[in-house]
Amino acid sequence: MSQKKVNATENTNQTGDVNGVFNREKNEDIPNFSSTSAERIIDKGNAWIVLGRDRPVGSTSGYGGSGDSRAAAIDICVGRQGTNPKRDDFVENNFGTLSYNRKAGDAARIYISQRANIDEYFGLKGGSQGLSKAKAAIGMMADDIRLVARRGIKLVTGGPKQVDALGLDTNSILGIDLMAGNISYTDKQGKEYLQPLVKGQNLIEALEGIVEEILNLNSAMTSFTMRQMVINSNLIGGTYIGSIPFAPAVPVTSQLNPASITLAAVENAQIVSDVIVPLQTQRNLVLNSLKLNYLQSSGTDYICSRYNRTN
C-alpha cells in the first residue's frame, strides 16, 4: 500500500492523515542523503548522525573532498531540506542561510571536524579574529540556540604558547567576537563597526578619576573667582568685609588706593599658588596620566578589552 504524503510542518486535520501521536512512527516526507563510501550513517526519521570526513556540501567539498589526512568529521543534523523536505530527493548537506545558497537549509546542525574552514561553511564574517582555515572546529546552527548552566558559563580562548590540533603554534591570543546579524565592516573613515567591549571596573576607576579632577577644577576656579572679586572690589573703591564682596560704597575715581594695589599684589600671588599652579599640575600630570592609563590601548588600565569585541 502506498503511503500518503503528509504536511511536514504540523500534524493537523488539514493534512488528511493524522499520525505519529504518542511518539509513534511518523508518516512524513524525508529526503534521501547522498552519502559516500567513507561515511557511516545513523538515521531515524529526519534525524541524522553522519560519521565520515570533512565536507560541507557534496562529496568533492571540504578537506575530505580534497583527500587531506586528519579530516575526520561528525555531522549531527535534524530536518534535512528544512521546511520543504521531499522523500524522492537525494540531497547533500545544506549548512543554511549564512552559507552557500542563502536559503534556510537544513533545520539544525552540530558539525564537528578535525580540519575545516568552519567560518566559510556557515557563511560567517571574519570579524577581529579573521577566518578559521584548516583548523579543528565545531559549528552549530539552528533557529535558536540556548546554552544553559546551573552554575556558570565560561567562554575561554587559548594563549600564545599553545599548539593547535595540527601541532602548530598559536602564536597569539584571539578573543571573542559577539557579532549580531553577522555584521562586521570598516567604514570610509576607518572606523570599525565591531568594537572592543568595555572593562567595567577600569571604566569606573577612570570616570571616578575624571569626576574628581572636575571637582578640583571647580574648586580652583571658585578660588580664582573669589580672589578676583576681592581685587575688583578694592580697585573700584568699594568695601569688602570677610569673604563676601559688596557693591561699591563710594563713587569710582581715577586714582588707585595704595592699599588696593598692595592687596591686589597679595591676591595675585595667591592666584598663582592656589589656582595657576594646581591647574598646570592637573593638566600636565593628572589629566594626561588619566588619558594615557585608561584611554590609550597601551595603558595598564585601558578601559576597553584588547581581545573581545561586539557590534
Image: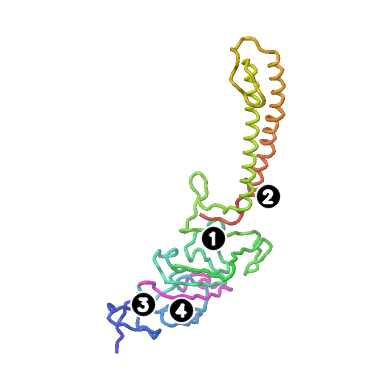
Q: At x 27% / y 81%, what residue is drawn?
A: 16
Q: At x 35% / y 83%, what residue is drawn?
A: 27
User: In the rendered structure, which disc, 2 or 4, sits on the residue that comes first in sequence?
Assistant: 4
Q: Which residue of the protein is positioned furthest toward the top in this rendering?
A: 254
Q: Secondary structure at mark 1?
A: loop
Q: Is residue 157 above or below residue 270?
A: below
Q: Position of residue 130 (x, y in %)?
A: 55, 58
Q: Position of residue 180 (x, y in %)?
A: 48, 58
Disc 1/disc 2 C-alpha distance (Å) = 29 Å
Q: Secondary structure at mark 3?
A: loop
Disc 4/disc 3 C-alpha distance (Å) = 16 Å
Which residue in the protein does label 1 denote? 131
Disc 1/disc 4 C-alpha distance (Å) = 28 Å
Q: Secondary structure at mark 4?
A: strand
User: In the rendered structure, which disc, 1 or 4, sits on the residue that comes first in sequence?
Assistant: 4
Q: Nearer the viewer, mark 4 or mark 3?
A: 4
Which residue in the protein does label 3 denote? 89
Q: Which label is found at residue 48? A: 4
